[in-house]
Image: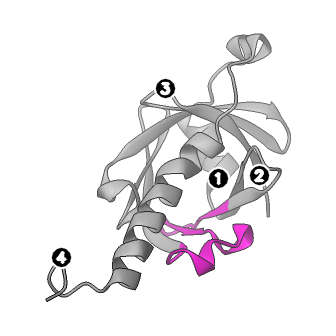
Amino acid sequence: MALGFPGFNVARRKAIIVSSLLVGLLPVGAMFPADEARADVPALSSTEIRKAVRGKRIYLQTPLGGEFPLYYKTDGTVDGSGEALGLGRFMAPKDKGKWWIESDMLCQQWQEWYDGKRQCFVLSRLSETTLYWKRDDGLEGEARIGP
């Protein structure tokens, strides 16, 4: 008789644990220490957020030099993929969700990642192609705006 969860083999349990850890670390990996210069950068308005992300790929920076792409489609859906970071061998690296703008914040909710919890971000523009983000739980980082 196998120990553990009924219906789960050892490989499946390992995949679940690894994927949970990796997805949990992604926002932390994208974080950077607060920068004094960012404190003076004004937050984007709802209109500016829409122009910055709608129909674009936003690449979250990671401390190892990689980028994690998120595609904010014009229909209000968002696609995420960890394939660019080589996460496919550890987990199902893709998820879909929805995005919207509320009270001058970019909000999103994934189907599976982050247990489907709603998250909202204040965005500021650091340059024409760089955004600073601060999530409603205090995590913060930078992202590159792609086409």
Residue 57 highlighted magenta (yes or no): no
Q: Which residues are magenta?
A: 69-93
The x and y percentages for residue 21 are 47, 56
In the image, is residue 90 part of the stretch drawn in magenta? yes
First of labels 3, 1 by sequence position:
1
Mark 2 or mark 1, which has the lower sequence index? 1
Q: Nearer the viewer, mark 2 or mark 3?
A: 3
Q: Residues within 10 Å of mark 1 (few under 14, many from 20)?
A: some
What amino acid type is highlighted by mark number 3? Gly
Label 2 and label 4: CA atoms lie apart by: 42 Å
Q: Are marks 2 and 1 in contact (CB under 8 Å)?
A: yes
Q: Mark 4 or 1 closer to N-term? A: 4
Contact, mark 2 vs mark 4 (Cβ under 8 Å): no
Does residue 75 show up? yes
**Could you say whether the residue bearing mark 2 is in a helix, strand or loop?**
strand
Residue that appears at 41% across and 73% down: 14
Q: Is residue 105 above or below residue 42?
A: below
Which residue lies under the disc numbered 4?
A: 5
Inspect the image, locate mark 1, and give the three-letter code of the amino acid beneath it: Val
Crowd rating for badge 4 (residues with CA inside 10 Å; few <14, some 14–19, many 20+): few
Question: In the drawing, does residue 69 fall left or right of residue 24?
Answer: right
Locate the C terminus and report the quarter of the image it occupies: bottom right
Instruction: Give SS at disc 4.
Output: loop
Q: As shown in the figure, which amino acid type bears the numbered disc 2?
A: Ile
In the picture of the structure, the residue carrying the numbered disc 1 is 53
Image x and y of residue 19, in percent: 46, 67
Residue holding disc 2: 145
Between 115 and 24, the residue placed more toward the observer is 24
Q: Earlier in the sequence, mark 3 or mark 4?
A: 4
Which of labels 4 and 1 is toward the front? 4
- The tally of labels here is 4
Q: 25 or 13: which is nearer to us? A: 13
